[in-house]
Amino acid sequence: MSLFAKSGLIAGVALAVSTLAARAEDVTLRYSNWLPAGYALDVKVMEPWFADIERVTEGRVKVEKTPKVVGNVASQYDVVADGLADMSLMVASYAPGRFPLIEGMELPFFGDDESKRSPAIWATYEKYIAPMNVFPEVVPLALFQTGSFHVFTTGKELAKVENYKGAKIRSSSPSLTRIIELLGGTPVTKPVSEVYELASGGVIDGATTPPDALLGFKLDEVLNRMTFVPGSLGATVVIVSVNPDTWAKISEADRKAIMSVSGGVVAKRSGDLHVVETQTAIEKMKAKGMTVDTMSDEELAKMKDALTPLQAEWIEKAKAAGLENPQEMLDFFAAQIKGES
């Protein structure tokens, strides 16, 4: 074989290897999407984030949304863990009891300002929960909160604590379930996607949900009265994760780049968005003629008194799950929200 031919062969092999290496870094993440079309969280948080992922990886990693949810809404953690989709947004509380440490950040009265509470969730997760590897089957890219929880009903007035007795209220988390129980109501644990049917069929008297979700899922057509709880009844912690085998296909440099636009960046984006979305939703409700009640200081004090067992109960669960000092975590979370640490 001539020297020229050998040189050409070597160059061809090198080009092929180079091409294969480049292709090995090109990954499309199939994202299981279950949020309604036009929903603010999807349009203003998720889609810009996906664009950021493509930008910082120079197009080597793209996110492609599925036309409909893979599996069902409550099973998204396992959908990703099993590789049925590469990536998804999961509501932690839709798997009650499975992630007890996350529940501490869903407790009530830590504040109703999402712009402060959402970044505090990521900071607390990084410091106290991530080292305990609570999501071993997936790779978490971000934890954050959506809107803060208040109460909506088909007409029942719940600005007075005594009125919760016997009320059938939709819950979406262990914390909210316990809140409803302690107030004398009957919790009905269902995803937000099922609330419309439950309320329209008279199965529930109301639901705990963020105000923007009420409008986003068109629940204002069946729920027409809101009780605003100062400090909020808590918040939903959501996790966006990636299948570990898919994550391993992405180069180390691109994984690092992706994390630079994930985590706390996404938490802040969601928090800032939901402050606006919550206020906008309340104003739209009022404009539609919905009744919006705010709990008085007296009634709020009664509610807090009734819900005193909540933190102590969570601390015991957290200890059983292996967290050495749960109160320290709650104190850190509260300090982050207040901007004290």
Image (tube, grey):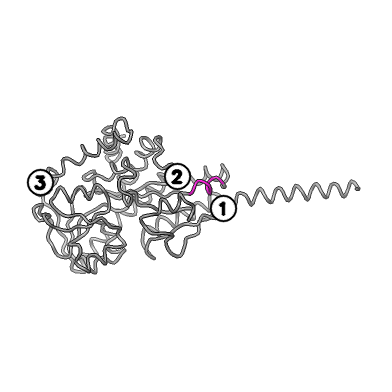
Q: CA distance from mark 1 to mark 2?
A: 20 Å
- What residue is pinned by disc 1? 27
Q: Residues within 10 Å of mark 1 (few under 14, many from 20)?
A: some
Residue 324 placement (x, y as % from top left): 31, 30
Say above or below: 14 vs 131. below
User: Residue flagged by tag 1: what amino acid is it?
Assistant: Val
- What residue is pinned by disc 3? 302
User: Residue flagged by tag 2: what amino acid is it?
Assistant: Glu
Q: Residues within 10 Å of mark 3 (few under 14, many from 20)?
A: some
Instruction: Please name the residue shown 34% across and 45% down the image.
Output: 98
Q: Nearer the viewer, residue 182 or 29?
A: 182
> Magenta span has 245?
yes
Q: Label for residue 137?
A: 2
Contact, CB < 8 Å: mark 3 with mark 1?
no
Q: Is residue 54 left or right of residue 180?
A: right
Residue 327 occupies which quadrant of the picture? top left
